[in-house]
Image (cartoon, rainbow, N blue to C red):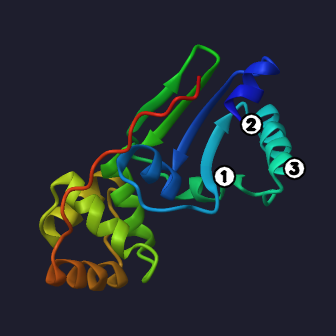
Amino acid sequence: MVALLKERGEPAGIRIVGGAAISLRHYERGPTKDIDASVHPSGPALEVARAVAYENTWADDWFNSAATMFVPFAKTEWVPIFEDGDVGIWVASAPMLLAMKLRASRPGRDDRDIGTLMTICGVRSKSEAEDLYEQFYPGEILEPKAHRMLDVILRTGLPDLPSTPPPLDLG
């Protein structure tokens, strides 16, 4: 997608969240079916994304903005993974991803990510998780399902610190 944007002379700023952000910068978590991102300007980049989908016989929504409604309003933290003057790609920081995953707290989908992100962020207790969440979503409290998930994660023990993926070569 980056090569095609550059070939067409289309500048773009891409901010990635969710599983793709985790896999690109924080730890290898296995494949993800889509990339949740916001992009500016959106028109040309989404057109390029559709062309990439067609070329690779991927689903049209492989690159979408569905999860951007969960990006915190109060505080955001982005980590650059590619910048060349025309195209820039940033992924959500580990603390921001942890806050977003705590907000979603989908059993069977977010458990592993929450535990691993807690390890990466040095979050060792429920109160520390609540404090981190409050930084990104001030005035909100964790839902009961998040508390239940944290109880299970902390009872079973946090995973070891994973290795960071190698830097991307997007040329």
Q: Amino acid at mark 2?
A: Ser
Q: Tell me which amino acid carries mark 3.
A: Tyr
Residue 72 in sight: no
Q: Which residue is mark 1?
A: 65
Q: What amino acid does circle 1 point to?
A: Ser
Q: Secondary structure at mark 3?
A: helix
Labels 1 and 2: the sequence-earlier one: 2
112 over 16 or under it: above or below: below
Label of residue 136 in the image? none
Q: Identify whether 112 is placed above or below 70.
A: below
Q: Are marks 1 and 2 in contact (CB under 8 Å)?
A: yes
| Mark closer to the observer (1, 3) | 3
Q: Nearer the viewer, residue 108 or 58?
A: 58
In this image, 135 relative to 5: left or right? left
Where the C terminus falls, by quadrant?
A: top right
**Viewer-nearest residue: 107 or 72:** 107
Q: Nearer the viewer, residue 81 or 29?
A: 29
- The residue beneath circle 2 is 42
Mark nearest the camera among 2 and 3 is 3
| Horizontal relation, residue 106 to residue 31: left or right | left
